[in-house]
Image (spheres, coloured by chain):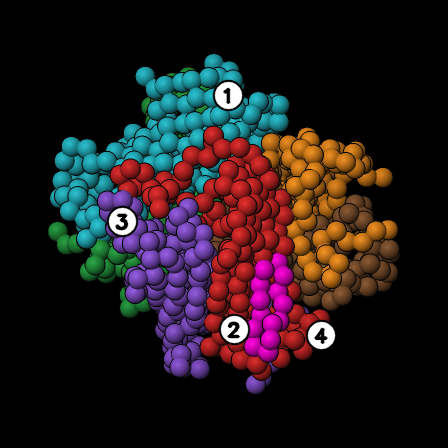
Chain colours: A purple, B red, C cyan, D green, E orange, F brown
């Protein structure tokens, strides 16, 4: 296991130089789950256009969140994103699964953008439902796959 | 279980009116865990000032993230925060526990600020260690307690 | 007609001192119209939850835009908003009317926040429909009413 | 008339994938008018360097606003802009015409940047003059022309 | 000399709790100088409304910069500012003096806002003149005075 | 000495067109000094991981500040940065020297990004130490060298 790339030889945080990397098409997919009470999920399901579209608001927040990644994560490079999509799907009777896909054509990967998008979408679900269920939890936020760049394709086990 | 407060009677998203609420001291505590390979945690532990202070960078990112909450979460009210602190503590041999505490004197609670702070700190740990461990997961992001406002004190079970 | 308050005696732009003003409940309502081809409005109407909720996305953009007002308008004071709501309503067969209401408890009014909210919502409608109708126009963006503060209530003629 | 490109087949908002589009020089021009009382325009005209340069402040706000477009418009791609210029010209005795030109070298057009620039400049004129004229209106915000990209050149009728 | 207030007993960075502090009127004044070649200052002086108002642009940038202080300085509290003014004055034949005054009614001081305003104004002068004079220097950025809060009035020696 | 490039022939501020410039590797180095009382520097030196890492926090703030340059400096082009590093080194017994290096592959230089990074790092040192030393000064903020682009390499005398 090599060292941490975000520090120099003296242990100082740096935004690493990507100037010598190739410009390639890069893509990353991240997921998360919001675990809640069954009554909360029922309320979300009954919403949609009539009573309030929790998943639609969270999807938009996630897309906008992806664009703020370099503002939030100190050593992330600012990137011109090509694409951001989010799926929010009820799963079982007490969970919403969030999947975020981000693509760019650039010198560095978009893993953090995908993870940030999923995270902001999950936080927005929490915000919109917290009046009825404060004990919701966000679980399993992780990278599912990435491709592009020197390290090529990677998928979660 | 009552309805979702972030929608009006027609199901339209709104930033709810808090103008009639009392100004009280409000406080919220959130936690999250970053689960990783033991080698990754060992690398973080060996860091500190000499090889690179992952937890120090993540702590700062979390504090700054708390201040961006209303930019990220669509229906959150902008708030003048009184205090933000983050603790990041290795736990066992393969996990870092993050605890974020936020306080304000205002008309609405700071749950989202505490959750956002913990989330951004966790994402920053991921960013700084992803070159050595892409399979890290963020687990158990949740509210631990809140106080202040009409609903008073609440603690997670 | 008195002079412009955003300049000092030498004609220099200033963020005027509101420190001596009373804290009162303030409210402002603004409106705008997006004028389009009848086919475009028909497409928006047929959308909603199934084909894509243009008005829902624009509403959310307007709410978030209200929070960015002091970032955009150079001499605006940053304000902790109490409430932001937006209504977007088809009007006739070729127009959408947008009404934004913003409230705060503070030392200065929220006219600019209401106008910015309506403006960002209108621009978002344009963005979402521009692939089918580039000739849309945003018309009649104006303040409808304001209340609170020394100057009291004002309504558009 | 085809469908709305900012939604997928299920009606979910997406930031569409521009990764396959060519990088070309793109340019867009937008205009708006701020309609006011003749006394207000007279006050602005008498300003300039001595009493306060309303148009200069608004021009700068428009330029900076163009750079915030992707923060404001949910499904806009972040872009590295090559150029932003704004002209603000008194027109007749009760109106200011604003024209914004934006250029970039990229995979997607800059219509929204030009419209946002014109819109923020117009809102800034309102802000600076609202103490003397609350009934100003922003009218005719529209795209005048665009070029670059697959759809080529387009001009307003 | 006591310890640094922005760290806790373990040396961890914190946004300190100001919740127990009194709300008072606070004010801070900062200054800086941009030192340049005489020809550069002559060019700025000859500008104004006709050839380009360097000082007007820098003034506006400083005012807007004051509003971004809490975004830039990690442990700064977000504050609702009451007032921001900037004076930029040619001094001698090769220097511009910048003075920034910021006021708020709140629980913590506005020193950082005044210093940030002066700093952003000075950087903007540099940006606008760098094509003719790359060797400009920003000197003597410092706090001139502050008042309000428990520590009362302070003036630079 | 030629004219100021950030104004057009009528003296209006513009974001100049860089669309015709070549994409080259660009790099800039800036420096600044924070001058303080010897006791303040002693306190910073005794800090590090145990009592609080002032220089580590300031370094991170500088890196993040570089990414906000186009938000702060009105006529700066937004850029995708390749690299940002900051060194903060105690110098003598009463000063910290800050050196910021920024690189990008683009159509315009990164002088402003390097100067902004150094400036935000210096302001953060001030913020973290102001409770013990209000009279600190930021001195000698200037460009040390730049390379890339048509004008080639430049070094401060």
Extreme residue toward the front, this view:
B157
Dots 2 and 1: beta carbons under 8 Å?
A: no
What separation in Å lies between label 2 and label 4 (alpha carbons)? 24 Å
What separation in Å lies between label 1 and label 4 (alpha carbons)? 56 Å
Dots 1 and 4: beta carbons under 8 Å?
A: no
How far across and down, in percent of the image, does residue C130 sit? 24, 49
- Measured along the vertical axis of the image, is residue C55 above or below residue E81? below
Say which element carries label 1: loop
Are labels 3 and 1 assigned to the same chain? no
How far across and down, in percent of the image, does residue B44 sit? 62, 75
Mark 4, residue position: B50
Label 1 is found on which chain of the structure? C
- Measured along the vertical axis of the image, is residue F148 above or below residue A128? below
In the rendering, which numbered label is found on residue D19?
Answer: none
Mark 3, residue position: A47
- Specify the quadrant that holds the C terminus of chain D: top left
How far across and down, in percent of the image, does residue A119 sit? 43, 61
Mark 1, residue position: C149
Q: Which residue is drawn at 58% across and 63% down?
A: B98
Residue A23 visible at all:
yes
What separation in Å lies between label 3 and label 1 (alpha carbons)? 39 Å
Q: Is residue E88 left or right of residue C156?
A: right
Magenta-colored span? B86-99
Are labels 2 and 1 assigned to the same chain? no
Mark 2, residue position: B35
Say which element carries label 4: helix
């Amino acid at each position: 296991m090599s060292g941490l790339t975000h520090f120099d030889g003296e242990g100082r945080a740096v935004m690493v130089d990507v100037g010598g990397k190739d410009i390639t098409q890069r893509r990353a997919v991240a997921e998360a789950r919001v675990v809640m009470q069954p009554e909360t999920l029922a309320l979300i399901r009954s919403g949609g256009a009539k009573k309030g579209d929790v998943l639609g608001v969270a999807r938009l927040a996630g897309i906008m969140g992806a664009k703020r990644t370099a503002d939030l994560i100190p050593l992330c490079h600012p990137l011109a994103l090509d694409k951001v999509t989010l799926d929010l799907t009820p799963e079982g009777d007490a969970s919403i699964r969030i999947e975020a896909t981000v693509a760019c054509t650039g010198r560095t990967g978009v893993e953090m953008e995908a993870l940030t998008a999923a995270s902001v979408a999950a936080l927005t679900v929490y915000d919109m439902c917290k009046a009825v269920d404060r004990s919701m939890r966000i679980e399993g936020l992780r990278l599912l796959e990435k491709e592009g760049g020197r390290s090529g394709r990677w998928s979660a086990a």
